[in-house]
Amino acid sequence: MNYSFTHNFAAQADAEDPLHKYRNQFFFPQHKGNPVVYFTGNSLGLQPKKAKEIVLEELEDWAKFGVEGHTEARRPWLPYHEFFTEKLAKVVGAHPTEVVAMNGLTANLHFLMVSFFRPQGKRTKILCEGKAFPSDQYALKSQLRFHGLDPKEHLIEITPDPETELIEDDRVVAAIDEHRDELALVMLGGVNYYTGQWFDMARITDAAKRAGAKMGWDLAHAAGNVPLELHKWGVDFAAWCGYKYLNSGPGGVSGVYIHEQYHGQKDIPRFEGWWGHNKENRFTMPKEFEPIPTAEAWQLSNAPVLSMAPLLASLDLFEEAGFAALRQKSLNLTGYLAFVIEQLAQSTGVALKVITPLAAQRRGAQLSVVIPNKGKAIFNTLTAEGVIADWREPDVIRMAPVPLYNSYEDIYRFGKILEKALNA
Ligand SMILES: *Cc1c(COP(=O)(O)O)cnc(C)c1O
């Protein structure tokens, strides 16, 4: 695209955007009678207008059928999680049997590590990114302690380069090679929550596998954002949350992926529950656990229907819009944001610095931008003018234009507000 920081350009780009119509499928918070500039879809996706209808349908069916809704509801509750499988499989590039929607993200990371972090002999260590999302750090460290291992010795953290704040793929691969005999697990965020850096997941997965370690990905900031091929890459396991780019609503259900090579095993270490048991005889309450021969074997409980329902509305929109088209728009839209920031750095003389790598294969929708000196004051002005973005101490603002509902005009409006704030 030939960008220009003018209203004409933004209006024209929206007019020519075949996905622009999906904006109208979402509710936008309002600021002084206008929709806010919403750049936090990486934190909590907006509400699809259809979500309420689907939740109300479940409430109606509950009123109408009581317990019989498990089989009689228009979307029967017994197999409710199955309504997500095909669609989520497409989002992460997996076979439908490899995916299931359940629990919350951190809970799932723990359940998956029960199966896939099995320290043995010299292989006792976990390799992860330094400054990982706090919940992931807590999960990894507590898993180590659970196995009687001291995190100080057994958690290898690859610290970000102090200049760029990034963790180059080369360094991850080199660290895997260096520790190849002692690694039990490599676990990273596919897209780093702070910098927006998208790792070369195929390459890192390959390196981890060759080293004889298991590879797990936290896809909180990747699912619904960047193209994924988990099965093809040979990833062992992954988990993500539903409420960021996938718009399932606050605390919405997480998804997991488990490579098919691990399915149908009775002796795999796993915390088990009745919803992982063979569907044919689950209700005869047999004593012996018989795993469903898919990722569903890792389910514990029956599906939280009311909280899962909104995700159906969102995944339908993903299907309809098409992931390839969304990704193309995402590259263009975030490219436009990078362009506007560059223009403003030049015109105002403020040394704005984008820390997110800009190459298409290294980023998704998010840009993290350092605003030197008066960053917090500028962020507060943005908020007061109706921009919802995310502030990280000491000086970074994170913004994620989402291709399903953000527009070029959003970015133009944001640019004008930022320009005023920088010049003030
Ligand atoms: C958002 C996010 C989480 C959130 O965890 P929950 O269990 O859903 O509360 C965890 N890890 C990463 C990397 C995240 O970005």
Image (tube, grey):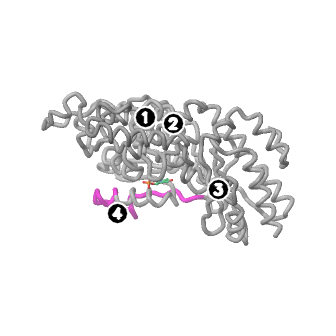
Circles 4 and 1: CB atoms closer than 8 Å: no
Considering only order in the chain, which callout, 2 or 1, is on the residue closer to the N terminus? Answer: 1
Amino acid type, callout 2: Leu
Residue 54's image quarter?
top left
Residue 172's disc is none
Residue 370: x %, y % from top left:
69, 62
- The answer for how far apart the CA atoms under marks 4 and 3 are is 49 Å
Quarter of the picture holding the C terminus? bottom right
Classify mark 4: residues with Cα within 10 Å, few (<14), some (14-19) or many (20+): some
Please give the label number shown on residue 315.
Answer: 2
Q: Earlier in the sequence, mark 2 or mark 4?
A: 4
Secondary structure category for the residue under label 2: helix
Residue 126, x across and y down, in percent: 41, 53
Q: Distance of mark 2 from mark 4, alpha carbons?
A: 41 Å
Rounded to the nearest whole Å, what is the CA distance between mark 2 and mark 3?
25 Å
How far is the residue under mark 4 from the one under mark 1? Answer: 39 Å
Label 3 sits on residue: 30
Q: Is residue 381 found inside the magenta-colored segment of the image?
A: no
Between circles 3 and 1, the one closer to the viewer is 3
Q: Is residue 342 left or right of residue 32?
A: right
Residue extending farthest to the left is 287
Q: Nearer the viewer, residue 79 or 197?
A: 79
Name the residue type under label 1. Phe
Mark 2 vs mark 3: give the one in front: 3
Residue bounds of the magenta highlight: 143-160
Q: Closer to the camera: disc 4 or disc 1? A: 1
Quadrant in the picture for the N terminus: top right
